[in-house]
């Protein structure tokens, strides 16, 4: 007997949707959600497909969020089977997007179908926020929907994003927050000259080195219960003309803070600037705030998720804030309680990406149980 989540996952994995393409995935979801009584709204922008579907008008509002786009396949000849022709081998479902994150999307839809069938007059509202611009620039995807909802004064009470969060087995880890990302391009200015006459110039690399050492040794914060301490890392350094007999006129240093809720972007900028001033550097700096940190502590959603995973998978899950950024950084602006829950992450973005077939109905059951606890309890 086939499993509805597996069947749906295979359908959408079979639709090529390399970012920012959607491949018709949102149309498929819109059709099935409309049959459940969802109102359908496409908030597309600059060629990006964004679906906002809602069932109900009252509080609380529970949202399933995710992305239909996938990363490029890489060399096709390296795949054991074609990346957009899903195939089951040895209990694993293979194809681009199986882990990140089409299996989660399939589980969200089948969970919603099961929930609505059992609770046709459920309290509150249930919604889907899907985009085809998460793996790319993320300038016209979830952020566009959040801007539209914010303009209408709409706020979400609960949100589950289907990012692959598990480590070794389904449910062993979920994300209850993510670190912020603050990048900078620091240009330290010197005076170019012949290297045989250094007294006629000023070497910006030499001048910057003590400040960089202090920045690297600085404790920015101690983190907190959920976040590790904030880190500062240099990613690139470029200085010089390429010649060995010229003192460079400037050096460019690219760096990044991965920061916790124990720090603010403004505070980090101020402290870094103070260190540069202390070392009397002649410099310019350009900042880019890639993401603010967000965190969902213990509460109704986290309790519902841990209970559901314990019931379905018979394990205790770990709440974690490790990893990179996600679209949660946008949704958190209008949602107090947000979690990322999905399958094992081991093969995301890799050749022969895959998930365990047996995990698909379990993931759907976890999502459905969370709905029951947050909307009908």
Image: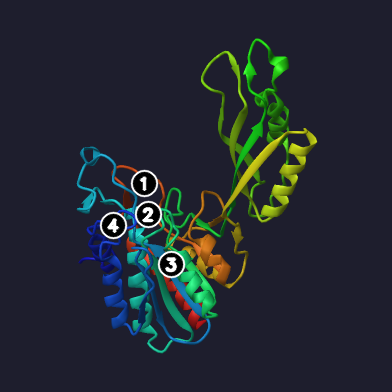
Mark 4 vs 1, N-terminal side: 4
Q: Is residue 128 visible?
A: yes
Compared with 147, 120 (above or below) is below
Q: Residue at x 67, y 53 (%)?
A: 265
Mark 2 crowdedness (10 Å alpha carbons): few <14, some 14-19, many ≥20 = many
Query: Which residue: 70% across, 23% down?
Result: 202
- In this picture, residue 191 sits left or right of residue 53: right
Upstream in sequence: badge 1 or badge 2: 2
Question: CA–CA distance between discs 1 and 2?
Answer: 7 Å
Residue that badge 3 annotates: 65
Asked whether the beta carbons under mark 1 and mark 2 sit within 8 Å of each other, the answer is yes
Name the image quarter holding the N terminus. Answer: bottom left
**Which mark is on residue 100?**
2
Q: Which element carries disc 4, helix, strand or loop?
A: loop
Residue drawn at x 49%, y 76% as measured from the top left = 149
Q: Is residue 333 above or below residue 239?
A: below
What separation in Å lies between label 3 and label 2 (alpha carbons)? 13 Å
Outermost residue toward the top in this view: 196
User: Circle 4 sits on which residue?
Assistant: 17
Q: Earlier in the sequence, mark 4 or mark 3?
A: 4
User: Which residue, given by chain and number where applicable, does mark 1 sit on?
Assistant: 349
Q: Position of residue 103 (x, y in %)?
A: 33, 60
Is label 1 in a helix, a strand or a loop?
loop
């Amino acid at each position: 007997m086939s499993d509805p989540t597996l069947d749906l996952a295979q359908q959408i994995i079979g639709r090529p949707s390399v970012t920012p393409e959607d491949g018709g995935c949102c149309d498929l979801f819109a059709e099935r959600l409309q049959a459940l009584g969802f109102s359908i709204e496409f908030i597309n922008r600059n060629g990006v497909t964004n679906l906002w579907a809602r069932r109900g008008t009252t509080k609380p509002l529970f949202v399933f969020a995710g992305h239909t786009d996938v990363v490029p396949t890489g060399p096709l000849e390296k795949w054991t089977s074609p990346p957009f022709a899903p195939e089951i081998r040895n209990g694993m479902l293979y194809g681009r997007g199986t882990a990140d994150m089409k299996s989660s999307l399939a589980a969200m839809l089948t969970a919603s179908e099961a929930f609505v069938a059992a609770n046709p007059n459920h309290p509150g509202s249930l919604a889907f926020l899907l985009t085809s611009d998460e793996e790319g620039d993320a300038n016209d995807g979830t952020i566009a929907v959040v801007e539209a909802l914010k303009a209408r004064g709409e706020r979400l009470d609960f949100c589950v994003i289907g990012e692959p969060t598990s480590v070794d087995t389904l449910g062993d880890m979920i994300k209850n927050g993510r670190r912020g990302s603050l990048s900078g391009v620091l240009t330290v200015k010197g005076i170019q000259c012949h290297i045989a006459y250094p007294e006629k110039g000023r070497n910006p690399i030499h001048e910057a080195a003590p400040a960089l050492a202090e920045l690297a040794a600085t404790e920015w914060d101690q983190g907190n219960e959920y976040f590790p301490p904030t880190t500062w890392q240099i990613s690139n350094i470029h200085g010089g003309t390429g010649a060995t007999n010229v003192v460079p006129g400037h050096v460019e240093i690219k760096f990044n803070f991965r920061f916790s809720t124990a720090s603010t972007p403004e505070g980090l900028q101020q402290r870094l600037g103070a260190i540069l001033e202390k070392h009397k550097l002649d410099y310019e700096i350009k900042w880019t705030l890639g993401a603010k940190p967000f965190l969902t502590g213990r509460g109704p959603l986290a309790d519902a998720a841990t209970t559901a995973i314990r019931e379905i998978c018979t394990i205790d899950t770990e709440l974690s804030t490790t990893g990179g950024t996600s679209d949660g950084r946008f949704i958190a602006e209008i949602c107090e309680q947000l979690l990322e829950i999905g399958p094992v992450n081991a093969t995301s973005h890799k050749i022969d990406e895959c998930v365990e077939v047996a995990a698909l109905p379990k993931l759907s059951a976890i999502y459905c149980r969370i709905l029951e606890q947050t909307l009908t309890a």
